[in-house]
Amino acid sequence: MNEPDRPLPADGSTANRFGRRTMLRAAKLGSAVAASMSVGATSTATPAPGLASHSGSVVLDPATIPKYVTPLPMLPTMPRSWATRDLDGYTISVRQFRQQVLPHDFPTTTVWGYGSADHPRTSHTPGFTIEARSGRAVRVTWVNDLVDGHGHYLPHLFPVDQTLHWANPPGGRSDRDTRPMFAATPSDYRGPVPIVTHLHGAHSLQDSDGYPSAWYLPRARDIPTGYARAGSYYEPHRHQATERLRVRWRPGTAVFQYANDQAATMLWYHDHTLGMTRLNQHAGLAGCYVVRGGRHDLPAGVLPAGRYEIVLVIQDRSFTPDGSIFFPPTRSFVADIPPDARFVPFSDVPPLWNPQTLGTTMVVNGRSWPVLTVEPRRYRFRVLNACNARTLVLKIVTDPLAARPVPPTLSCWQIGADGGFLPTPVRLGQVLCAPAERADLIVDFTDVRVGSELYLVNEGPDGAFSGMPGGAAADPATTGQVMKFVVVPRRSPDTSLPPAQLRLPAAQPLGAAEHTWRISLNESHSRYYQQTMTSTMLGTVRADGTPEPLGWGAPVTESPAVDATQVWELTNFTQDAHPIHLHQVQFQVLDRRRANGAARPPERWETGRKDTVIVYPHETTRVAARFDLPGRYVMHCHILDHEDNEMMRPIKVVPG
């Protein structure tokens, strides 16, 4: 593989290509699941035609799914359970239910989702949006309610690989949160499902951060004897929260409190269970969380608001003809392994885990290929890439089937990113958004003729993203299309400011750096099958510049001091780009460079605060961060398949 000469350009032609090992046999596979606004809807539709994959599974042909026949759902606000003078309280349950994800002529889909425990019909995926005010705390009781009507536990919707380093409830207290040993290749786990929720991008104390080993099972009647009911960090965090908040964590729950002492921005909540994040999010466990107000927000009336401010949660997944979400059932779904390969313990290859999971169908706010009517005025779109592994390159065009790259019809003005506003608005012809990244966009339809039809398309790859210019874009007929806009007459005057006139709040300076942590991004291949990946890993960089890969279970090697600004130097020794996320902080991207090359400044849309950054192949990306809360946190790749198989490391924040 030739190394990329440069990352994706800010404007103009799409820069991407397939990774050498991620070409999937037959359909690309889905990530986080979503569903429709018709909560609890039923369908009498008959199964749709499907395509047989090389593994024998039948995947719904995306060409048979009609596009732009369903309105874009507007995600409602999550209802509060209670409130005091200075605190908003929620009780939010994780449940299993059926929703209409595909058009109404297709069967409904079994999903998991978050919803108010007080209002069961709010269960939905993506979850309803939690609205928070800067400086006003939010307390959430997260309930694992993955049980049936008789109180018996529900097994997972997808195959769970027991050979990874995972939660491992069957291991009991002594062997939970481990990579278990087997005498024969195990089948998938069918026991009670652990969950723990992380508020991504939040400035949270460790007991409310959703640590991967702080998971807990539902309060089911039939938990098997000897199973661990909670992870190894659940009890320590429960004790800390009880002491700090004077609250009780009942079995099957965790009580987290978010101070919201950070800039106005859009965060998102999602599952973070050790070794199962890709599966739990794929089943539907994700939603948005908007922080408003404070000195790092703009006054009312400056930006489009109300029905002109719209959250867009973009996901990709695949389906079977009966409407079920499809997830690869075996490791043999990827073309980098021989058909007669053997798996753990007879080789070093996990039997079910796949290196990256991409879907054949694009879903926005829980509906496949939706349509939105817009007026000739400015709109604010709060975009979240909630895909498992797919990097998006978004454009607004007039012809969704045009040869790629297609010139944009309308520009997007990016005014914010993960952690808040940019220093100044940035006009873009295309928007690059890796998994977990957010983009705060203004799109101006003012001069677009009523009756016009425009399309949000995706020119990211149908495979691993590397940042290489001139590569193959997503299929224009399927994953290369996202949603449609239809312009209708304006209902009221537009009083928002043109984006070029905006004066955005400045982020607080971080101060001079006192130390540098050198982190490596690595991948491991089988000793038995040369082309087969067995895991991805973070690690350190030795003094001679070579990587030292480390697994999740290795001792902590990064211990930043409280209130010290420190540099995190991320060097990618792999051939694909990785979105790296640090918990607790919103950091500043400093620069990128190739080996012995000159430093390259961050892209214009990366000049605000970030919590997730793309690290390109064979490059070093440097970010500056200041941790100010002591405790145990994590950093990881947000390609969820990677995170679940060793590309995550603990961080211990220590007193200065």
Image (spheres, rainbow, N blue to C red):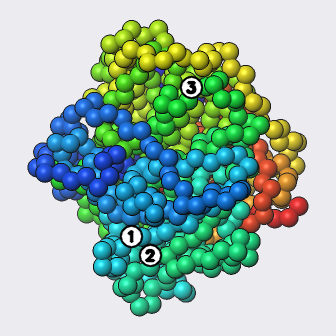
CB atoms of marks 1 and 3 within 8 Å: no
Q: Identify the residue at image location x=87%, y=42%.
A: 511
Question: Residue at label 2?
Answer: 218
How far apart marks 2 and 3 lie (CA) works out to: 41 Å
Question: Residue at label 1?
Answer: 146
* SS class, disc 2: loop
Looking at the image, residue 247 sits to the left or right of residue 531; the answer is right
Q: Which badge, 2 or 3, is on the more N-terminal residue? A: 2
Q: Nearer the viewer, mark 1 or mark 3?
A: 3
How far apart marks 1 and 3 lie (CA) works out to: 38 Å
How far apart marks 2 and 1 lie (CA) works out to: 6 Å
Q: Identify the residue at image location x=64%, y=44%.
A: 291
Residue 179 shows in the view = no
Q: What amino acid is at disc 2?
A: Pro
Question: Residue at label 3?
Answer: 304
Q: Identify the residue at image location x=80%, y=56%.
A: 628
CB atoms of marks 2 and 1 within 8 Å: yes
Residue 208: x percent and y percent?
Answer: 65, 64
Residue closest to the eye, 493 or 128 = 493
Residue 535: x percent and y percent?
Answer: 48, 59
Looking at the image, residue 215 sits to the left or right of residue 51; the answer is right
Q: Identify the residue at image location x=33%, y=17%.
A: 453
Residue closest to the eye, 617 or 257 = 257
Q: What amino acid is at disc 3?
A: Pro
